[in-house]
Image (tube, grey):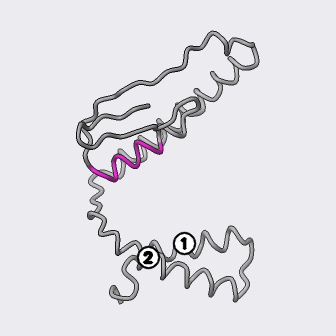
Amino acid sequence: MRRWLPYPAMSGLLLVIWLLLNQTLAPGQFVVGAILGVVLARIFRLLDAPTLRLRNPHRLLLLAARVSLDVVRSNYAVAKLIVRGQSRAVQSGFVSVPLRLTNPYALVVLACIITSTPGTIWVSYEAGRNVLLI
């Protein structure tokens, strides 16, 4: 079964997302979603991604809670600046951040955190120097 369906959980999740996006449980959409789930999982296998080992799921939940709280606070602060008309006083610029992260999954999580925060964007990553430009 692993040969034709290498990532069954991902295939199932893709099927559920497809059905939610189409807002229907019609048999035709179910078949299309299942085919997409199988095909995309097989394509993902070709990427040869490193194995993910989640050592402490509790910390992942704490990180998600912290990031959610920080995003809400940042949205509030940015909205307050805009409403009060103080946005001209804000200086924009780029920041180079040296990283110790090398795990591709950790870098993806960091990219999601940075881009979900208002006013920040992941601009560039230099793998050779392990430097992030925000």
Q: Residue at x 28, y 34 (%)?
A: 99
How busy is the neighbourhood of tag 1: few (under 14 within 10 Å), some, or many (20 plus)?
Answer: many
* In this view, 97 is above or below 58: above
- Please tell me in which quadrant of the rendered image residue 80 appears: top right
Earlier residue among tags 2 and 1: 1
Residue type for callout 2: Ala
Magenta stretch holds residue 107: yes
Image location (x, y in percent) of residue 35 = 55, 85
* Residue 15 is inside the magenta segment: no
Q: Residue 14 bears which disc, if any?
A: 1
> Pointer 2: residues within 10 angstroms few (<14), some, or many (20+)?
many
Q: Where is residue 46 shown, x and y percent of the image?
A: 34, 74
Majority SS type along the magenta span:
helix
Residue sitting nearer the eye, 52 or 114: 114
Residue 48, quarter of the rendered image: bottom left
Q: Is residue 131 above or below residue 15?
A: above
Provide the residue designation for mark 2: 41
The secondary element bearing badge 1 is classed as helix
Q: Amino acid at mark 1?
A: Leu
The magenta segment is 103-112
Closer to the camera in the image, 5 or 99: 99
